[in-house]
Image (tube, rainbow, N blue to C red):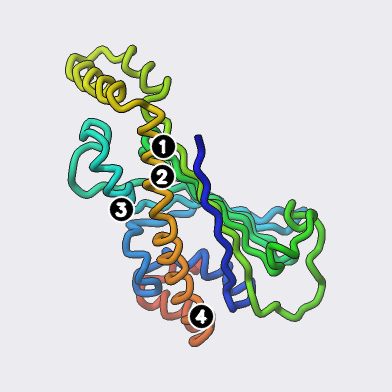
Amino acid sequence: MVLTHTTNHTYSHPFPTVTLAFFLRYYSPRLNPFSSHVLSSDTISSHVDPQTGRLHTTRIHMKKTRLPSAVVKLLPSSVTGGGGDKSSYVLETSVVDIKEGWMKTESRNLNYTGVLSVVEEQRYSTTPPDQATSSSLSGSGTVGSSRTLAPNTFVTTTFSYRSTLGGKKHEKAAAESTDGNEESGTRRFGDWISGWGAKRIQSSIESIASNKTDDQILKSRDGMRIVLERLRSNGVVAVLRELRRREGNVFEQ
């Protein structure tokens, strides 16, 4: 089972500014106070397709673990790793077409995927979702050739939640385990799964995570709003210069 949650939002800023804010949103808590949970952010690859002119970027973010506390309480410590601060990695891919006026992004967690896999897909566009054509949704065609920037940017966000806890992979891992302590822990985990029922556990985990979506989206939008307002008030160049001065010249390359 996969549980999905979709929302729409409009930023009162032109598309180029919104895309810049997206890439800067995790740069520093000084720029975005809502990014304090992000411990590091690194670019794995970035290139412009010479044929389409589209920017393709892959980044990896290390964040403080955001596994819902209700899920942690629901699961045994052998699954969650017990208490204490934890970190997890999130893989982010994006494609930007500045000429056609759209950006697609996808973020997915790389840790705890057996407990809960979360995929966040976003589509930013100069065209409202209800007016988008099939060609613009597929990333082909031209939105417009006018040099006048549209004042608004529209974004559709879809979260997909899936838990496979207690599935065949876990059963296979238990069968292949040879360490005595691991066998004991796996046996207890298997007994716990049998007592609750895998489907029931998976559905509960997905529901708990989905219920936290609205709060997560609001914080994300608040962070973007702060970055956008600073870009609008101070100007892109001034903001980048200030970040260089405070954090070092990371934009030189």
Q: Quadrant of residue 191?
A: top left
Residue 230: give x, y in percent of width and height: 47, 81
Work out whether residue 58 can be spotted.
Answer: no
Q: Residue at x 49, y 81 (%)?
A: 229
Could you give the CA–CA distance between mark 2 and mark 4, rounded to whole angstroms?
Answer: 37 Å
Q: Secondary structure at mark 3?
A: strand
Q: Secondary structure at mark 4?
A: helix
Q: Which of the two discs, 1 and 3, labels the residue nearer the N terminus?
A: 3
Work out whether residue 243 can be spotted.
Answer: yes
Which label was assigned to residue 203? 1
Q: Is residue 187 above or below residue 141?
A: above
Q: Residue at x 42, y 20 (%)?
A: 168
In the picture of the structure, the residue carrying the numbered disc 4 is 231
Q: Nearer the viewer, mark 3 or mark 4?
A: 3
Label 2 neighbour load within 10 Å: few <14, some 14-19, many 20+:
some
Q: Which of the two discs, 3 and 2, labels the residue nearer the N terminus?
A: 3
